[in-house]
Image: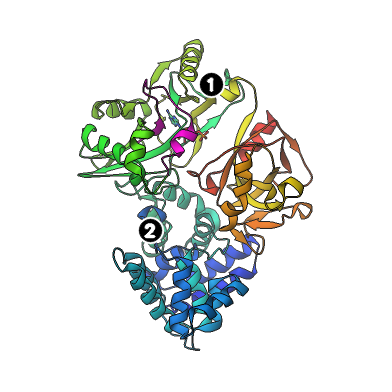
Amino acid sequence: MARLLFAKLAELYEQLEKITSGNAIRALISAFLKKVPKKNVEQVTYMTVGQIASEYEDINIGIAEKMVLRAIATTADKDYATITALYKKLGDTGLVAEKLVGKKRKNLPVNEVFNALHDIARATGAGSQRKKTLILAHLLKTASPIEARYICRIVLGTLRLGVGDMTVLDSLAIAFTGSKKAKKELEQAYNICPDIGIIAKTLATKGLKSVRKIKTVIGRPIQMMLAQRIGKFEELKEKINGSIAAEEKYDGERIQAHKKGRTTILYSRRLENITREFPEIAEQIQENVKAKNCIIEGDCVAVDAQGNLLPFQVIMQRKRKYDIQEYIKKVPVCFYVFDLLNLHGVSYIDTAYPARRALLKRIVKETQRLQLAKQIVSTNLDDIEEFFNKTVERGGEGIIAKSCASNSFYTPGKRGWLWIKWKREYAAKMADTFDLAVVGAYHGRGKRGGTYGALLCAAYNSTADRFETVCKLGSGFTDEELKTLPKKFRKYETKTKPARVIVHKNLVPDVWFTPAIVVEVVGAEITQSPIHTAGKGLALRFPRFIKYRPEKKPEQATTVKEIEAMAEK
Ligand code: AMP
């Protein structure tokens, strides 16, 4: 293919829509990628996961359903009412477009579609709605029916082919190195540079050697390092040799701050730009971090007037588009920093933790709103227990114990034994908590008529890139939360089972959801179950809803491996 036509991509999507086996999906995508001209590989990978750029880039197409319907009306020269009537019947703008627009022309290059979608995203400010609609209408005019179907879906973020970044990494490995073996190295690079387009382009044009050399860059978020859990406090000594740096565990929002000259960008755990939500923290970093360029990380947590730590639900009030200035005063926060990943362009992820912390201490001037995470360093468990108790007293969630060994590097995206969490729930032996992806729901009856009776929840199998079920979640919701369930999940409904979701035939839900929303669930015990698909059939008994975890992506849910390890204990 000298010039890649969008029709070819649309054909691929149509085929992908029909299959549910992960391996078949990978085989199809990798065979396709092999034939794609190198210059198009980046565009193809973004679009196949339903995007036009990496999420962190904050490039939003910014078109609502209504505007797409308007664009279809213009293109098809029909009145708006006809279009909305058809939409009501078909339930998908893509299908409406397919029915009404397009000639049999099939010579639209991928390049043109990709650029037009970026033009739509770039249209902002006064009159932008009209401009966006016009660009889309123009694009639809040059598209064939099936192309129009997928253009509309990409525009609205409803492509949902069941293809995630991990599926693409697998396919890239097969296409450009001949086997899935290289996936591990691609994943490592992806953790440092979570941009599927850059990985794809580097691999296709420069090979695996260059992918290995990808480094941290200020302005491009890094997947965040995660903490392991233990069953008994004493295990800390078994898992961490020598000195342990015990730090307060803040029940807040993890933030990675990238300071580059006069701008500071804050990234969430999902690697979304959330600077708008915490402008005062960005300002604090500008003023009080004594380094021109750096990447630092910490947890932002709500605090009261005395500086006591407040629970997660309080800081969640700051997740809003409006009245930000008012809420800066209403819900004051403090950013507790605990790591340094890059200083003046030099990567420090392969430097031992004590040295990273020492540098961090040197550049951070503490204020009421910007503090170093409180820490003690000790080899003595009694000291650490005392520190834990004090932390819980002032509202902390527990501690994170960190290795100080010579290999205590920052391991992007990994949940290893260099960081171990110990929460107050574990200490009270109450139960364990799980972050699960919601993949379906069952209609409620009686008192729950009109809403859902239970949600079907799944853990993430990171090896197979699949979501495997562990429980039906029906308790722990307030009346208000119950009532709003269908509305909250509507956007993620799919007609058929999403490809990466594995469900037993006796547990098929009334409604399927693309894995998108993550819930934190407390469970009493893990048992064997014939109808759940996590690992060899593990289930969570007596699950109760605690809260939504909007800062987590479904792939950041508790993994099947973790649940297996807990079951063993
Ligand atoms: P969890 O989300 O329960 O798996 O706990 C891990 C999270 O604890 C991390 O993602 C951080 O957001 C948070 N956290 C709070 N305090 C710290 C700290 N001092 N060091 C590392 N992570 C922390």
Q: Is residue 470 above or below residue 102?
A: above
The residue identified by callout 1 is 236
Q: Residue at x 40, y 63 (%)?
A: 62
Give residue 134's position: percent from left, percent from top.
37, 76
Residue 328, by quadrant, is top left
Give residue 336's position: percent from left, percent from top.
36, 29
Q: Residue at x 50, y 15 (%)?
A: 389
- Dot 2, crowdedness within 10 Å: few (<14), some or many (≥20)? many
Give residue 109's position: percent from left, percent from top.
40, 79
Q: Residue 536 vs residue 484: left or right?
A: right
Instruction: Report if residue 379 lies within the magenta region.
Output: no
Give the Cα separation between the discs numbered 2 and 1. Answer: 38 Å
On the question of residue 294 being in view, the answer is: yes
Q: Is residue 42 above or below residue 320?
A: below
Instruction: Report if residue 306 lies within the magenta region.
Output: yes
Residue 285, by quadrant, is top left
